Amino acid sequence: MNITFVGGGNMACALIGGLLQQDYPAGQVQVVEIDSDARARIKQQLGVNAVAALTEGINGSNVIVLAVKPQQLSAVAGQLAPLLNGQLVISIAAGIRTSDLSRWLGDYGGIVRAMPNTPSLIRAGMTGLYALPTVNSQQKEEAANILSAVGSIIWVEQEVLLDAATAVSGSGPAYIFYFIEAMQQAGTELGLTKEQAKLLTLQTFFGATQLASQSDEDVATLRSRVTSKGGTTEQALLSMEQDGVKNAIMRAMHVAYERAQQMGDELGGK
């Protein structure tokens, strides 16, 4: 299976690196990138071919991964449309719906839309996937293999659920970083050094996540096990409840979901 990445940015390079780590042949991966410095870097760091011309880049390709900025996708799709010949097209451009991409590609049906998040850059990502009904099972497996090279994946049956995935996992790392910032700042206010507060906070997040992933119990039960009656954790959680922290997080995620839908309308109208 020959794979062409259109766009050689960070996410494309992460996907390529993940594939190569799984012993995918470098000779079956190609990148189309208009920036000459980026092409040189891709060739040097990843050992795959990188070209400037779209026509050259997709020659002999079975799968085309569109990894350009959302604002550029309409123009790229217009160039790509007359060159397609049954290839699977995977878009990782945030906010672009398959209906709009299909229209830009001349009502093309072989499209999978993917929503990876930034931890994919260290191959610890989470990606939501949606396929148009005309995508066959083999093509879905090919898409899954490519995106799972940088982490875990889920398939959704309705494209609107990718907006929900965006609100949870796409934007999710920023919520975690925000909470980490707050914990680190509180740690320094309590007398810890910045380095101590950072290590304590990051290892706590890492350990808690590992425990939640590996436990058969739900997170509410795990939380209750840490919360001794009359203890420090109980008082901290009561303070958060009084400040409406949980509801604020949930409300923020609903806002993110609504914005994802608005972005689809805005970007797709171009």
Image (tube, helix red, strand yellow):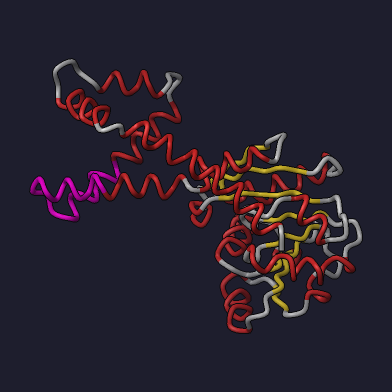
Q: Residue furthest left?
A: 191
Specify the quadrant of the image occupied by residue 46.
bottom right
265 or 22: which is nearer to us?
A: 265
Residue sitting nearer the eye, 75 or 259: 259
Q: Is residue 117 left or right of residue 269?
A: left
Q: Nearer the viewer, residue 101 or 247?
A: 247
Q: Is the C terminus in the top left, top right, bottom left or bottom right quadrant? A: bottom right
Q: Identify the residue at image location x=43%, y=21%.
A: 218
Which residue is located at x 43 percent, y 34 percent? 250
Question: Residue 158: image x %, image y %?
Answer: 71, 36
Q: Position of residue 135 (x, y in %)?
A: 83, 44
Query: Residue at point 61% right, 55% down?
Result: 94
Give the magenta-colored segment's residue range: 182-203
Q: Residue at coordinates 70% horizontally, 70% vertically from top-left?
A: 31
Q: Is 25 left, or right, of 22 in this rendering?
A: right
Q: Quadrant of residue 131?
A: top right
Please say if 265 is above or below 241. Answer: below
Toward the top, the furthest residue is 229
Q: Tell me the quarter of the image containing the N terminus.
A: bottom right
116 w.r.t. 57: above or below = above
The image quadrant that residue 163 belongs to is top right
Residue 59 placement (x, y as % from top left): 85, 70
Instruction: Give the main secondary structure, helix, strand or loop, of the magenta stretch.
Output: helix
269 within the magenta span? no
* Left or right for 261, reference 134: left
Q: Position of residue 44 (x, y in %)?
A: 59, 77
How many labels were placed on the picture? 0
Task: Tell me, yes or no, whether the highlighted magenta stretch contains residue 183.
Answer: yes
